[in-house]
Amino acid sequence: MSAEMANEIKLISGRSHPELSDKIAKRLGIEVARTISLNYSNQETSFTVGESVRDEDVFIVQSTATGDVNEGLMELLIMISACRTASARRITAVIPNFPYARQDKKDKSRAPISARLVANMLQTAGANHIVTVDLHASQIQGFFSVPVDNLYAEPSFLRYIRENFNPEDCVIVSPDAGGAKRATSIADHLNTAFALIHKERPRPNVVGRMVLVGNVEDKVAILVDDMADTCGTLVKAAAVLKENGAKSVLALVTHGILSGNAIETLNGSVLTALVVTNTVPLGDKVQRCPKLRVIDISPTVAEAIRRTHNGESVSYLFTHAPV
Amino acid sequence: MVRNIVVLGGNSHPALVDSVCNALSLPPCNRILTKFSSGESRCEIQDSVRGKDVYIIQTGFGGNGSRLNDHFMDLCIMISACKTGSARRVTAVLPLFPYSRQPDLPYNKAGAPLFKAGSESGKKDYTFDSVPATPAPGIPKTAGLTNGTDITSKLLKTSLTNGNGVQSPIKQNGDGYFPANGVNGTTTPSPVTRTGAYTTHDYENLSHIGAFQAKPGYKQWVAQAGTLVANLLNCAGADHVITMDLHDPQVQGFFDVPVDNLYGRPLLKRYIQQHIPNYKDAVIISPDAGGAKRATAIADSMGVDFALIHKERRPTKITDRQNASMMLVGDVRDRICILVDDLLDTGNTITRAAKLCKKEGATKIYALLTHGVFSGDAINRVQASAIDKVVVTNSVPQDKHKALLGPKLDVLDISPIFAEAIRRVHHGESISVLFNHD
């Protein structure tokens, strides 16, 4: 009994997204563990542990802040490695926005499969379990030999749509063929129509020609995707939908990376709203972009942590969003 | 011309890549190595590496607008890309090994781990250059700057004359890092931040650090990243590692693959013989006990006297004698001092050692170091110190340091050593000749 008593949740927060960690901690009714990360003047990252993690169930929350992906990743690896050296019973890396998820295949000669490298690095550092949200490609789970819980933002999105719109007026649109499955799943749950935009992508971060497949006339077109980076795709897709007679266009996206000129692009677009979850720290982007709405994902992540710790099933969370 | 070999360079030290390639008379491998707008590294290797012997040169140095962790991730990604591109063997060439020198405990001046951040406030009567080299929470960025000793005023003067050049690397360290860190980022109440023109260590988020305290009864400890870095290189797929003057030779043991630790010693020795007049009468000094072996090796092989500086870690009452915690073992009166160490980071150790030597009557002070990182306010500190000449190798880019320090800094070229090591490793020849070559 006493051994079980000692095994508690230790929530460790990286520097990339302390707001999310605080929300998760609040939800779980615990405090974030006393640790501190800093950079030496020679830019090496240092991590100091201020309390015992021996035999505890450690959850390390680290998202990847836009622009500082490698810093965040290195910090996460050092934190995991430190907890392992400190005899933690189990180390779960909670990475809401999995870094390098888009580099998941060898799409040209000698291109790195960086997602697999990240997976290997996390395991090398000593992660026993991974919790993430809406992996860009669920096959990334196969890069790991440890369990990966891929949570979905879909239940939260469904609730958002039901609360704000009449599903009968909506069309769910996938901005590319790859996201069709994600979009159809939402359309099926809401019992609404579905449309798809086919696009050509000549180079990364550049968007080519777009063709709409389906009917959006006089409907609220809801674009669904897993990440919004430079927002070029979304904005172009929105314009195509508007041209095809959509009443209004909004976008539901899990990871709001919003790099480069994304905010300016959004502000100048026909999109009425971009709804993202807080998997990625948004900083002042909410102030800079009036179209940006944020859904809090921390209840889902916190519940996944609680269930993982207690050895309960997390599959309930794939269809339900805790309030 | 060496066949079947590919030399691939990272972004950390393009000049070294070029000169190594020159020495091997082959062109560097074409590659794209940039960042996506999201901050993820983008790497594409444009020349074929199938069946080739690949050498990837990336040093552990962030500066000139780049970041150390980016370079390290780039290295891992490049290794992994070559491996998936069917390279026969991938060798990581790290002239300066990153994370090789991490302090084990957050020591303060008195030698005790820093439990309480507040306890530092009463110790403001240190001179500037007595700030301990080990960064730790609770030590303010500009600790010890409050008293107006001559060295401080000197430093301020130099920082003024150097103007923007000095400021920029510091700025890049301190500002704009993790910009999305909304809660703590802007509200920093800064009693010590921007008062001086330079910083001791990069602590963004001072408010957070000030509040940091270990749980009662728990002795906080600092994570050691050395093993992790070794494991990550292994996991990325490095088959061989070449580095130079590892701070701890034990790091070699962290790897499952062969590690060739080259020595900068022959270069330093040659410099002494060629550039220091009457070097036979000089004294070679190790600024701390850990580097004694390195220094004695040079001293013995040249038949030069040796001295050692002992750092006292025991809690001692600081009196008016400023270097109470340092002792010089050996005689330096009226002689030339040659300080020998492996790494100059913030320059604390070496400048303090120089000060002590000067006080003990040394006529001229040379500082010879393999790696000149010059982080934080090192440039200012070295500029104001008693050191007459700093000699470093180009294991990290030195152009900027050279521009700031001028004739005070001499840079030795290590590319022939690395080129020769790469050639020998590629042909399967022994490289031990490089170890005892004088």
Image: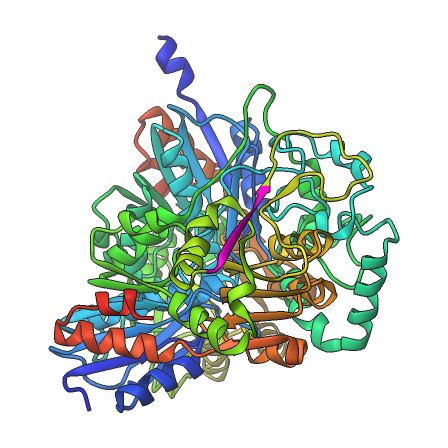
Residue B37: image location, x then y, percent = 49, 74
The C terminus of chain B sits in image quarter: bottom left
Image quadrant where residue B324 sits: top right
Specify the principal SS of the magenta part. strand
Image quadrant where residue A194 sits: bottom left
Image quadrant where residue B34 sits: bottom left
Residue name at image x 69 percent, y 55 percent: B200
Pick the front one: B101 or A270: B101
Residue B47: image location, x then y, percent = 23, 86
The N terminus of chain B sits in image quarter: bottom left
Residue name at image x 52 percent, y 47 percent: A46
Pick the front one: B110 or A7: B110
Vertical arrangement, residue A40 with respect to residue A54, above or below:
below
Residue furthest to the right: B148
> What colour scheme was applied to this rendering of the protein?
rainbow
Q: For this view, does B171 lie left or right of residue A274?
A: right
Residue furthest to the top: A1
Residue B255: image location, x then y, percent = 26, 51
Q: For this view, does B404 lie left or right of residue A149?
A: right
Q: Is residue B241 visible?
A: yes
Vertical arrangement, residue A313 with respect to residue A171, above or below:
above
Vertical arrangement, residue B261 with respect to residue B93, above or below:
above
Q: Is residue B85 visible?
A: no
Q: What segment is highlighted magenta in the picture? A: B304-310
Instruction: Answer whether residue B309 is magenta in the image.
Output: yes
Instruction: Answer whether residue B382 is magenta in the image.
Output: no
Residue name at image x 33 percent, y 75 percent: B417
Residue B162: image location, x then y, percent = 76, 76
Pick the front one: B54 or B104: B104
Q: How many marks?
A: 0
